[in-house]
Image (tube, rainbow, N blue to C red):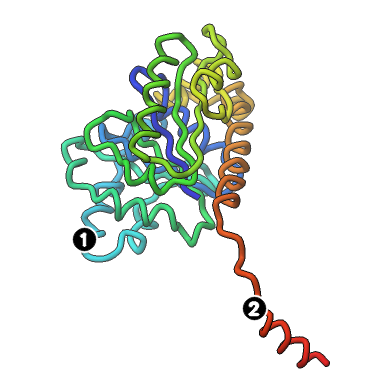
Amino acid sequence: MLIALCSAKGAPGVTTSALALALSWPRPVVLAELDPAGGDVLAGYGRGEISAGGLADLELAARRGGPARHLDSQLLRLDSEGRARLLPGLADPASARHVDWDRLAAALAAVEDGAIDVVADCGRLRAEHFPAAVAHRAAAVVLATGSSLRAVRAATRAIAELRERETCPGMLGTLVIGPGEPYGEREIGEALGVPVVGSLPRDQKAAAVLSDGAPAGRLFAQSALLRAARTVATRLVESAAAHESRLMPPPAPVPASVTTVGASRVR
């Protein structure tokens, strides 16, 4: 299942939120850094680790064959168990114009025949070379927003844009970052007209681990940010799966002749 996370103008902490969700995901997951402005996870959470692969190398390799056959070799572990892995983003934003987003979207939507989920950090909606093909393929598109009046107004325009250009036939929802500043989930959901999949608190200490590679500490896994991320991740998986099942066509009825033949054989 492919989940696309994007932001409106001025939305805070989208990459940090995507990383928190990936580390809290209830199933094996790949965090794909698809922000055309470049990837930040290795520079922050990875403490400056330099990757020999990632999105740019995947694109080069895909020109010699389908990207799905090269994807696994470009993934890095995000946790010790390897349940969460990372597709590092672009080091040079200028190379975003060369990425075949359609081909990449097809590969990400079918990772190991859907047995592994993909959380795609797609960056800002109105960015040049925004990976619209990925959002179009996603089971759910989640718009991250703050809870201030300015943030909610920007999110309202972004939701309208997503609907107008039919970018996301899948479930459309929003993730509130820092609720209560001053608006809560219910008010924001009503203003945007889409379901709120949950909210993440402004937990600066835990966020610094994800964004800047600060020491995690013994209680990092039980931080307010990761506890909330676990709740959001579980809710998002369930909601997206339920939405997909509603969109699936009903099974074709069995012709009466087939039923009759089968019955006669049993007798």
Residue marked by disc 1: 63
The amino acid at mark 2 is Pro
- Name the mark on residue 2: none
Report x, y in % for residue 101: 28, 48
The residue positioned 55% from the left and 22% from the top of the image is 189
The amino acid at mark 1 is Arg
Location of residue 106 by image quarter:
bottom left
Q: Residue furthest front?
A: 256
Residue 162 appears left or right of 174? left
- Name the mark on residue 255: 2
The residue positioned 45% from the left and 9% from the top of the image is 149
Q: How many marks?
A: 2
Report x, y in % for residue 254: 65, 75
Residue 167 appears left or right of 17? left
Of the two numbered discs 2 and 1 on the same chain, state the one appearing first in sequence: 1
Residue in front for this viewpoint, 85 or 51: 85
Instruction: Bin the neighbour count of mark 1 within 10 Å (Cα to Cα): few under 14, some 14-19, many 20 and up.
Output: few
Q: Is residue 169 above or below residue 224?
A: below
* Mark 1 residue element: loop
Q: Is residue 140 above or below residue 69?
A: above
Q: Quadrant of the C terminus?
A: bottom right
Report x, y in % for residue 119: 46, 42
CA distance separating discs 2 and 1: 45 Å
